[in-house]
Amino acid sequence: MSRRYTIALAAAALIGAIVAGCTSGTVGFTPTPAPSSPPGAMSYQQIELLSRPAVKEAFEEFESHDKTNRSEPYKDPVLQSMIKSFALNFRSEKTAATLQAVLYPNVMKVDLSQNTTKAAYLGYETGGATGSKFGGRALDDDIIDISLGALFGNTLSALGLIPDDHKEAPCLTTDNIGYDKMNTSTFPYVQSPL
């Protein structure tokens, strides 16, 4: 067998394995046969829930992540109470309750009636205070810093949502990861990390 033929055969096998792996389901979902659907139809079982990066990581014990990942966003048995109980360790009752209201459920909310071309992380929940009322996430939103700013900083009071409780921890309001926001017009649209 020639070397060229062997390399081509190995490459074809690798491509076949990749394609088979990629078509077996959607990232974050495990396909299972749908109970009452026609043959070949698939339903999906959620195995990850991460619309708001850093929320689960900041508020939940690691042991609770799998339970949260597999729960419906509006029926999470752990996250909602953990947001408030964690925040009450160092923030006022009003700040903790507002964090709970803004960050739960762990979904991206958008207002499709808004006439805008710009998404804004927590925009829907804050009435547009973070950029637009549309909500969702813009490619250049610094999700982690926004979340940390709400939890440890004065983001909520600066947005006029609540009075300042003066219990900020400024050293915890950023992940200190730079992003130049110089996006490209081709996939994956973002620059390499700095």
Image (tube, rainbow, N blue to C red):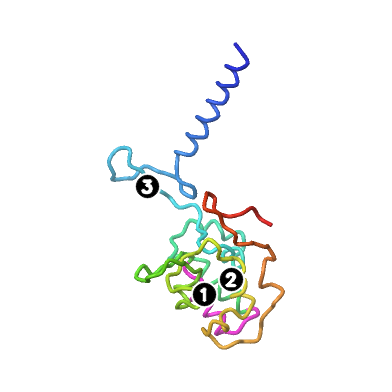
Residue 157's disc number: none
- Circle 3/circle 2 CB separation < 8 Å: no
Mark 2 closeness class: few <14, some 14–19, many ≥20 residues within 10 Å: some
Residue 130's disc number: 1
- Circle 3/circle 1 CB separation < 8 Å: no
Magenta range: 89-105
Check disc 3 and report its element: helix, strand or loop: strand
Mark 3 closeness class: few <14, some 14–19, many ≥20 residues within 10 Å: some
Q: Residue at x 56, y 21 (%)?
A: 8
**x and y percentages locating residue 55 in the rendered image:** 57, 66
Residue at the farthest top position = 1
**x and y percentages locating residue 76 in the rendered image:** 47, 65
**x and y percentages locating residue 119 in the rendered image:** 46, 67
Q: Quadrant of residue 163?
A: bottom right
Q: Residue at x 60, y 66 (%)?
A: 144
- Indicate whether residue 98 is drawn in magenta: yes
Kindly identify the amino acid type of the residue bearing the numbered disc 3: Ser
Q: Residue at x 49, y 65 (%)?
A: 106
- Circle 1/circle 2 CB separation < 8 Å: yes
Q: Is residue 57 above or below residue 21?
A: below
Residue to which mark 3 is pinned:
43
Q: CA distance from mark 1 to mark 2?
A: 9 Å
Residue 146's disc number: 2
Check disc 1 and report its element: helix, strand or loop: loop
* Magenta span dominant secondary structure: helix
Q: CA distance from mark 3 to mark 2?
A: 34 Å
